[in-house]
Amino acid sequence: MSKHDLYLYPVWLRIWHGINALGILLLIFTGISMQYGSIDYPLLPFKTSVVIHNVAGIVVAIGYVFFLIANHFSNNERQYIPNYKGFFDRIITQAKYYIFGYFKGEPKPFPITKENKFNPLQRMSYITLMYLLVPLVVITGLGLLYPEVIVNKVFNMGGVMLTAVLHATVGFFISLFLIIHLYVASIGKNPLRNYKSILNGYHAADDH
Ligand code: HEM
């Protein structure tokens, strides 16, 4: 470790991230099993999937409330405030870097600092993820766990059906996020560096 390494991920964030990542992976696996597994060839027995999905869902929901509170009372929340100044230019610059610049060895257009640890694309996707997609999947999931709270009909469509469709759609987008997240996290001087950072808290100095 060098003295120029940046301490970006405090202990609470790393604990939340680890539990949340494991929970979401279990939710995706059991969710796919329930949705697509046939009775004769389930990925996992249906009842087992339901139990794991419910338990992991409750853990992720509690974790989410913890994230909201800890993020708010720590300095980390400022990383999640949208910056609209030159928004599209900055998004395009970062996208160009991911598509071309990175492969040509160009320097990062938005170097990582303690004040600004996310590049514009990361900031936008983390805000969408943590303040739109995760709360939506948690709320619709709780609705499906306690269907008596769901309104019976919305425009002549069953409320439970609509909630289930919304839940699965948001789950799909979170799965998509995860694939991109894992790829983007591997970008850098060494593909494993960022994975190490989210475990030990430090971002390597020669990779800002
Ligand atoms: C196996 C699963 C996962 C791995 C290996 C992983 C890896 C990482 C890494 C390396 C970082 C730090 C670098 C960066 O900011 O890009 C990070 C940050 C982050 N990850 Fe993940 N992740 C996983 C799953 C998830 C899931 C399921 C979510 C949410 C649904 C998530 C949300 C986040 C957020 C919000 C941050 C930024 C935290 C902050 O600094 O405020 N990750 N992850």
Image (cartoon, grey):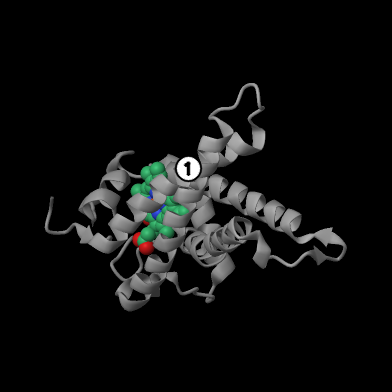
| 2 in relation to 74, above or below | above
Q: Specify the farthest residue to the top.
A: 40
Q: Residue at x 38, y 66 (%)?
A: 67
Decide if residue 108 is in sight here: no
Q: Viewer-proximal residue, 34 or 201?
A: 34
Q: How many marks?
A: 1
Q: Viewer-proximal residue, 14 or 208?
A: 14
| 140 in relation to 79, above or below | above
Decide if residue 160 is in sight here: yes
Q: Tell me residue 79's x, y (percent).
A: 39, 70
Q: Specify the farthest residue to the right.
A: 156
Q: Amino acid at mark 1?
A: Ile
Q: Tell me residue 175's x, y (percent).
A: 55, 45
From the viewer's perspective, tell me whether residue 14 is left or right of residue 37.
left
| 31 in relation to 135, above or below | above
- Determine the image quadrant of residue 116: bottom left
Q: Residue at x 22, y 55 (%)?
A: 202
From the image, tell me which residue sits under label 1.
52
Q: Tell me residue 46's x, y (percent).
A: 58, 34
| 17 in relation to 182, above or below | below
From the viewer's perspective, tell me whether residue 3 is left or right of residue 17.
left
Q: Viewer-proximal residue, 160 or 111?
A: 160
